[in-house]
Image (cartoon, rainbow, N blue to C red):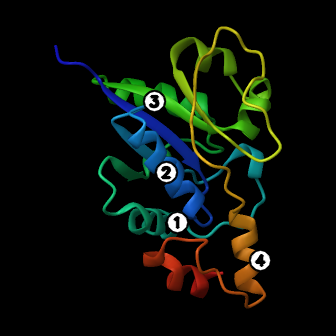
Amino acid sequence: MPDKIRTAVFGGTFNPIHNGHVAIVRSILEQNLADEVWLMVTPCNPWKEGQNLLDNNIRLELVKKAVSGIEGAVASDYEFRLPVPSYTANTLRHLRRSYTRREFILAIGADNWAAFRDWRDWQYIISKYRLIVYPRQGYTEDPDIPEAKVSILDCPLFDISSTAIRQAVASGQPIDGLVPDPIAEAVSALY
């Protein structure tokens, strides 16, 4: 049987996707930490409940356009069919059953890694999956979870947030350089 396809799951609301997200995807692929990166657009992140999100399908389309042309990058609506809120452990369980020829790897930011023990079923995740942790301003990549299998992504820190992009658009400020060019006009019109 051939080796399983190493598939990094990079989840988020992507409200909107920005150049930092895209750079993380590129870094994972360039550093050969995964064969593919699935950008898992979540309909409802339990940490962000009550946040005003664009329609799921609009966010999915923005992600598709943002990563078009990046071989191995896939915009995924898989969580759209799962119960909400979207708990990562549940998503990983479903993916594992649906795609038996893939090895799933979880890609998260150092901010989430620092709070990982607060995640639902975090012990299940670290017992079954490798993780890729990418740097975030003000957070360490070492929360002292010795049993976890973690690769630290070598990529620069990005001082970009979806919140700041939405605020910039709302106040009429330019977002040049913050979001991928193919979606800049759409993002400016949507927020």
Labels 1 & 4 near each other (Cβ < 8 A): no
Label 2 neighbourhood size at 10 Å, few (<14), some (14-19), many (20+)? some
The residue identified by callout 1 is 59
The residue identified by callout 4 is 167
Q: Is 39 situated above or below 186?
A: above
The residue identified by callout 3 is 94
Label 3 neighbourhood size at 10 Å, few (<14), some (14-19), many (20+)? some
Q: Considering the numbered disc 1 on the image, is that residue within a helix, a strand or a loop?
A: helix
Tell which residue pokes out farthest to the bottom in this image: 172
Q: Residue 41 appears at what percent x and percent y? A: 52, 53
Mark closer to the observer (4, 2): 4
The CA distance from mark 1 to mark 4 is 17 Å
Reading the chain from its start, which is encountered first: label 1 or label 4?
A: 1
Tell which residue pokes out farthest to the top in this image: 147
Reading the chain from its start, which is encountered first: label 4 or label 2?
A: 2
The residue identified by callout 2 is 80
The CA distance from mark 3 to mark 1 is 22 Å
